[in-house]
Amino acid sequence: MFRSAQHDNVPSVVSPRVINIEDLRRAAKRRLPRVVFDYIDGGAEDEQTLRANCHAFEGVTFRPRCAVATPACELSVSVLGASLSMPLILAPVGSSRLMYPRGEEAAAGAAGAAGIAYALSTLSGCRLEDVAAKSKGPLWYQLYLVGGRDCALSAIERAKAAGFSVLVVTIDTAVSGMRERDLRNGVKELLSGNLASMLPFVSQLLIKPRWLAGFLTDGGLMKFPNVVIPEKGPMLYADVTAALEHSVVTWDDLEWIRQAWGGPIVIKGIHTEDDARRAVNAGADGLVVSNHGGRQLDSVAPTLRILPEVVASVGDQIEVLLDGGIRRGSDIVKALCLGARAVMVGRAYAYGLGAAGGAGVARAIEILRADLVRTLKLLGCPSIAELDRSYIDVPAGWPAA
Ligand SMILES: Cc1cc2nc3c(=O)[nH]c(=O)nc-3n(C[C@H](O)[C@H](O)[C@H](O)COP(=O)(O)O)c2cc1C
């Protein structure tokens, strides 16, 4: 399905060159200009939450059952009515087309080929219909209200018509987080279109000629083709930060969004048990315990730490997902032991996309799948459905099971 990395002039992502997600991260760093790599890799302010999301997994330790044969491990799970080959969904990652030509299409294609779901960001560089055409797996559409209500209503209609099955409403983006790396790398200046402002920052693009050639051949700086503003057309890249500030989603909006969509809705960006209950009261079918991968409000608790209180409070009423900090299949296992039905990953696959396009995303998924099977076997657990708190120890102070 994916053309060979050799043919595309992108680095190979096979073993032993790439054996884990950190290798994909390093490969992405080599291929991408600093401004694009840091856009993926960075977080808000001091990046405390970004780091804490990952470290929280280290604090949870396994309690394996040894001398147990598990010849085949069952990984499949049903999430929001769709059967997934493993408990993994590719999270919405805006502007994936900066990472690789037709990036959203490549990522959706890799997800579909692996039998997992892909969530397309509102801030996609590819038309949602083109993304749908590239995937044979379940597709979710992530909604921001940038461009206003009419613009959102038209995207909702298009997403329904194109076969997207779940609407993900992200609620943690009242304004864009303070991503200091983006400021230092001149994102604002590079988007300004003003040559004098851009000049101090263009060298980082010029020293990555292969990326630059792909980017330019793919049309250069794209607009957002799924944010079509009435009488204006697709939103410009440079307008998005201001648009986010005027487009906060409130709990009241959920009512008209639910009516317009008419299908399953997932609320993404739950940080507390209180908001989890609000999501249930708003009629959501699923929620994602998520802090946007530490890209929004810094210093919020890592998602894994919040998961138990959310599961205890609403886990019997709504499907609970988690994202943030997942870099290994064993991280997925820990989240499942603490009650998540499935997880989303953002950076883990975005690094793959930046490293080698669809082949890199496929490799990220393959790495996580192999990790998952190996971890289950080493735990002596035959199926993800059987994972529970008895397979782990959590740090002192975490809520009881
Ligand atoms: C480069 C990048 C862009 C993102 N864009 C969006 C977006 O457009 N909409 C959204 O809801 N979340 C967005 N996110 C957040 C992810 O959906 C997800 O919550 C986060 O990446 C999970 O953390 P992880 O990267 O540690 O897996 C983005 C994340 C990254 C890394």
Image: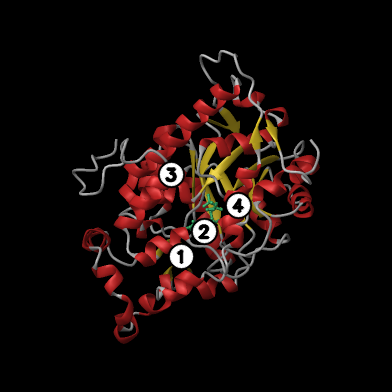
Q: Nearer the viewer, residue 209 or 114?
A: 209
Horizontal relation, residue 27 to residue 63: left or right: left
The residue tagged 3 is: 21
Tag 2 near tag 1, CB within 8 Å: yes
Q: Is mark 4 on a helix, strand or loop?
A: helix
Residue type at mark 2: give it.
Ser
Label 4 and label 3: CA atoms lie apart by 16 Å
Tag 4 near tag 1, CB within 8 Å: no
The picture quadrant where one finds residue 109 is: top left
Label 3 and label 2: CA atoms lie apart by 37 Å
Q: Nearer the viewer, mark 2 or mark 4?
A: 4
Q: Dividing the image into 4 quarters, which one contains the C terminus?
A: top right
Q: What element carries label 3?
A: helix
Relative to 97, is 339 above or below?
Answer: above
Looking at the image, is mark 2 or mark 4 earlier in the sequence? 4
Seen at 42% across and 33% down, the residue is: 114
Looking at the image, is mark 4 or mark 3 earlier in the sequence? 3
The residue tagged 4 is: 53
Label 4 and label 1: CA atoms lie apart by 34 Å
The residue tagged 1 is: 228
Q: Nearer the viewer, mark 3 or mark 1?
A: 3
The residue tagged 2 is: 154
Label 4 C-beta lies within 8 Å of the nearest ligand 1 atom: yes
Relative to 185, is 15 above or below?
Answer: above
Looking at the image, is mark 3 or mark 2 earlier in the sequence? 3
Q: How crowded is mark 4: few (under 14 residues within 10 Å), some or many (20 or more)?
A: many
